[in-house]
Amino acid sequence: MSGQFITFEGGEGAGKSSVLQAVSCQLKQLGYQVVTTREPGGIEIAEKIRDIILDRAYTVMDARTEALLYAAARRQHLVERVVPALDDDQIVLCDRFIDSSLAYQGYARGLGIDEVYQINQFAISNTMPDLTLFFDITPEEGLKRIALNSEREKNRLDLEELSFHQAVYDAYMLLLDRFNDRIVAVDASPKLEVVVEYALDLILKHINNHTVKTK
C-alpha cells in the first residue's frame, strides 16, 4: 500500500468529524486525492452494523457483543473501502478506527485494552493508521457541545453517564503514551477554524515526509 491512512479520534463532542470534512476539502484544493470515511460505517454492510450498535433501544447489549460488532464492521470497511484506496495511492481520512475500540470497549467497558487489541488484530491484519490525530477536549465540554447541537446524531453512547466518558478520555491518555509514534494530540477547545488549521498543518507535514503525490 502506497497511500496514507490518517485517523481522527476523540471523545463525544470533540468536533473531529467537522474538522475531518474541512481538512478533506483543503487537501483536495491542494491537489491530493482524498477519501473520507467513518467507523463504524463507510460502506453498506458496516453502516447496517452501525445502526445496530448505536441504536438507543439496545441498551442491553453486552460489552463483548459490542466489541465484536465494531471489529466485524471494521473488517468489512477495511477490505472494501480503505485498503483499495490506499493501494490506489490515495489519502484516507477516517473518522475513528481501532483506537476507539481500545478506549470505549477496552478501557471504558472494562474488557481490557490488550484483549480488544487482539480481537482487532484478527480483523485488520496489522493494517494500522500511519497517523492518528486525537482531538483533546474535556468530557464535560464535549457533552456540553452535544447538548447545544440539535443537528448532531444522538446515539446510544450519549446515554452513558459522565463517568463513562471520563473513562474514555483517560483511555485516550494511555493510548497517547503507548502509541506516541503515531498519535498526536490536537487541542480541540478553540474555534473550529483554528483547530482545522492546526490539524491540516500536522497532516501536511506528515504527507511531505512520506511523499504522497498530488494530481
Image: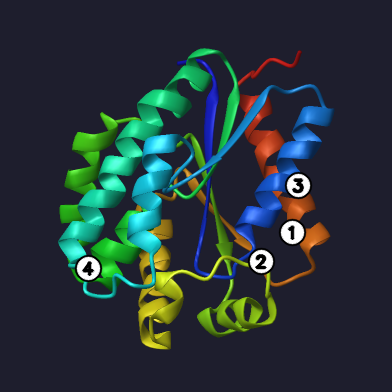
At which x and y percent is residue 131? 52, 40
Which image quarter: residue 33? top right
Label 2 to label 1, Cα distance in Å?
Answer: 6 Å
Frontmost residue, 47 versus 8: 47
- Toward which corner of the image does residue 77 lie, by quadrant? top left
Q: How is the image coloured?
A: rainbow
Q: Earlier in the sequence, mark 2 or mark 1?
A: 2
Quadrant of res 124: top left
Q: Secondary structure at mark 4?
A: loop
Instruction: Quote the CA–CA distance across marks 1 and 3.
Output: 10 Å
**Depth order, front residue of 40/101:** 40
Going 33% across and 59% down the picture, which residue do you hit? 53
Residue that carries the numbered disc 3 in the rendered image: 22
Q: CA distance from mark 4 to mark 1?
A: 35 Å
What is the crowding at mark 4: few (fewer than 14 residues within 10 Å), some, or many (at least 20)? few
Q: Which residue is under mark 2?
A: 188
